[in-house]
Image (cartoon, grey):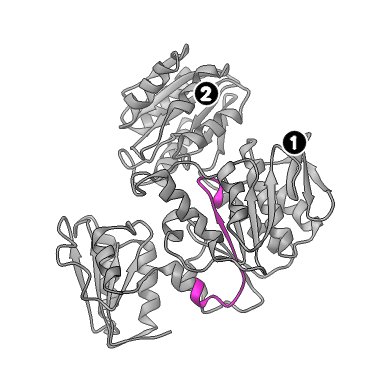
């Protein structure tokens, strides 16, 4: 694919954009690029430095920028093609005007689907997609398959294109932003739990769900759809795909994979025992969904049973996903910073029977905290809640409306050192201290990784 004599717009300057521009460097002739972002020069200092290195290569006719508050004032209708980064709203008025002018809207993921020579296993869901994608990859590798992990937890998909062959398999984590306007679906589509999230970007829950549904909308009869039978929306997608449908469940026996009496089974043709949930290194029953999803998808892609068992029971999970950091004076510290929704915090709470000190709060994502508040109030083992960040009062209000919390509630801590020290001071031997914020991180930290790394740093300082 070549772009010759084109005027190209790129919306949003981030890691995926940088990968796209590096790819374009090899596939353009006499073309110009304009990069649009609402952030200022100072906020994008690191990214702009990398772009300037590309400018000096003189591959592009020009590279120009439109940044800051009025970054889209000139519109997008003068371009030949527009590339949208995942976080840029697909239904932005300027994009809609461009569509009406028949200007193609593309993205890194669209390009990858068009050019990838091998099967893609795509995984989406509100939470758990990173864990599930990584476990599928681990199983396939254990089976001797040539598997690549791509997306937020692996390589940039576009960087993989040069080395991929028809014999490879790409395990690809896919967000709603990436799926929103794709026109191809993966060979194997895995749909986990779909809750309400990213309502700060999607206009409503229905739009968010429909973006996720694109993962199966363009499948053929040769493809596979692997759906969560325990959630009504995910299960309902069986009626929207031409693919062969398999399910996974932690509640009932299905064609695919399931948990029954604390035993994991693979059931494509007949039930095969994989092993006991007691032997899993992944904490929490919510991970049973991720494991059964991964087992089903990997098996459909020719992974053998012994390799499935080996990979599943040696898999420790991903960083920042309910990760045990350290045990100090018989107090265990768990980093679940990737928890940015109430649903994932509820899952974390349900993963423990011992006394809990839980750290909640951060910046707003438009989430409803009613169910989380109800879980906190009815839980018998939460002894202390530490509320942090912009969402402190909203979460506290939800808890009060759920008849109030009988344990201690701590507010007003302004940095991670204070948070960790206070949690440890309130703990007793046998307690678990869990950072599972149920919120985004951008009020106090750069991102969830920075938040989790700060937590780990100060925990290790205690020792």
Q: Please identify the quarter of the rendering in which residue 30 is found.
A: bottom left
100 or 387, which is in the foreground? 100
Q: Is residue 387 magenta?
A: no
Residue 258 on image: x %, y %: 73, 44
How many other residues sit within 10 Å of disc 1, few (<14), some (14-19) or many (≥20)?
A: few
Q: Does 310 sit above or below residue 264?
A: below
Please give the range of residues in magenta.
113-129
Of callouts 2 and 1, the N-terminal one: 1
Is residue 463 visible in the rendered structure shown here? no
Mark 2 packing: few (<14 Cα in 10 Å), some, or many (20+)? some
In the image, residue 304 lies at what x, y percent?
79, 61
**Side of 14 where 154 appears, left or right:** right
Is residue 120 within the magenta segment?
Answer: yes
**Mark 1, secondary structure of its residue:** helix
Q: Residue drawn at (85%, 52%), measured in percent from left and top?
A: 270
Work out how far the residue at label 2 is from the one at label 1, CA to CA, in angstroms.
24 Å
Q: Is residue 182 above or below residue 308?
A: below
Q: Residue furthest top?
A: 406
Relative depth, front residue between 231 and 447? 231
Quadrant in the rendering for residue 260: top right
Q: Position of residue 53 (x, y in %)?
A: 28, 74
428 to 332, vertically: above or below: above
* Residue matched to label 2: 375
Q: Is 348 above or below relative to 77? A: above
Q: Nearer the viewer, residue 133 or 206?
A: 206
Residue 278 as seen in the image, left or right of residue 200: right
Q: Are marks 2 and 1 in contact (CB under 8 Å)?
A: no
Give the residue at mark 1.
278
* SS assignment at label 2: helix
């Amino acid at each position: 694919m070549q772009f010759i004599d084109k005027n190209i717009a790129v919306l949003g300057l981030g890691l995926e954009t940088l990968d796209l521009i590096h790819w374009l460097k090899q596939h353009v002739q006499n073309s110009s690029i304009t990069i649009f972002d609402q952030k200022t020069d100072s906020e994008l200092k690191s990214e702009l430095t990398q772009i300037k290195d590309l400018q000096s290569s003189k591959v592009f006719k020009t590279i120009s920028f439109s940044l800051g508050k009025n970054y889209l004032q000139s519109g997008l209708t003068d371009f030949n093609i527009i590339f949208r980064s995942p976080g840029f709203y697909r239904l932005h008025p300027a994009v809609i005007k461009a569509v009406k002018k028949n200007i193609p809207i593309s993205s890194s993921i669209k390009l990858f689907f068009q050019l990838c020579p091998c099967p893609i296993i795509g995984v989406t869901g509100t939470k758990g997609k990173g864990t599930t994608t990584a476990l599928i990859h681990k199983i396939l590798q254990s089976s001797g398959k040539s598997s690549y992990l791509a997306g937020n937890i692996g390589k940039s998909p576009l960087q993989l294109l040069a080395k991929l062959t028809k014999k490879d398999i790409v395990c690809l984590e896919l967000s709603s932003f990436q799926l929103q306007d794709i026109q191809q679906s993966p060979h194997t589509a895995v749909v986990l739990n779909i809750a309400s999230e990213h309502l700060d970007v999607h206009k409503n829950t229905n739009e968010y769900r429909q973006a996720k549904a694109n993962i199966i909308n363009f499948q053929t009869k040769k493809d596979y759809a692997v759906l969560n039978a325990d959630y009504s929306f995910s299960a309902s997608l069986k009626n929207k795909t031409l693919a062969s449908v398999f399910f996974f469940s932690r509640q009932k026996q299905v064609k695919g994979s399931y948990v029954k009496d604390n035993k994991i089974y693979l059931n494509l043709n007949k039930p095969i025992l994989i092993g006991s949930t007691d032997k899993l290194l992944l904490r929490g029953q919510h991970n049973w969904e991720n494991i059964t999803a991964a087992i089903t998808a990997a098996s459909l892609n020719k992974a053998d049973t012994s390799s499935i068992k080996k990979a599943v029971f040696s898999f420790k999970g991903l960083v920042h996903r309910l990760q045990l950091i350290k045990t100090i004076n018989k107090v265990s510290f768990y980093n679940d910073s990737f928890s940015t929704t109430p649903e994932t915090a509820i899952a974390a709470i349900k993963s423990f029977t011992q006394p809990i000190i839980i750290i909640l709060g951060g910046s707003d994502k438009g989430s409803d905290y009613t169910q989380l508040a109800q879980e906190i109030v009815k839980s018998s083992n939460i002894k202390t809640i530490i509320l942090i960040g912009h969402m402190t009062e909203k979460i506290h209000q939800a808890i009060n409306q759920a008849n109030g919390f009988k344990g201690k509630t701590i507010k007003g801590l302004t940095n991670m050192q204070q948070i960790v020290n206070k949690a440890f001071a309130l703990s007793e031997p046998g307690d678990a201290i869990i950072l599972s914020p149920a919120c985004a991180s951008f009020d106090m930290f750069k991102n969830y990784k920075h938040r989790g790394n700060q937590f780990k740093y100060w925990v290790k300082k205690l020792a």
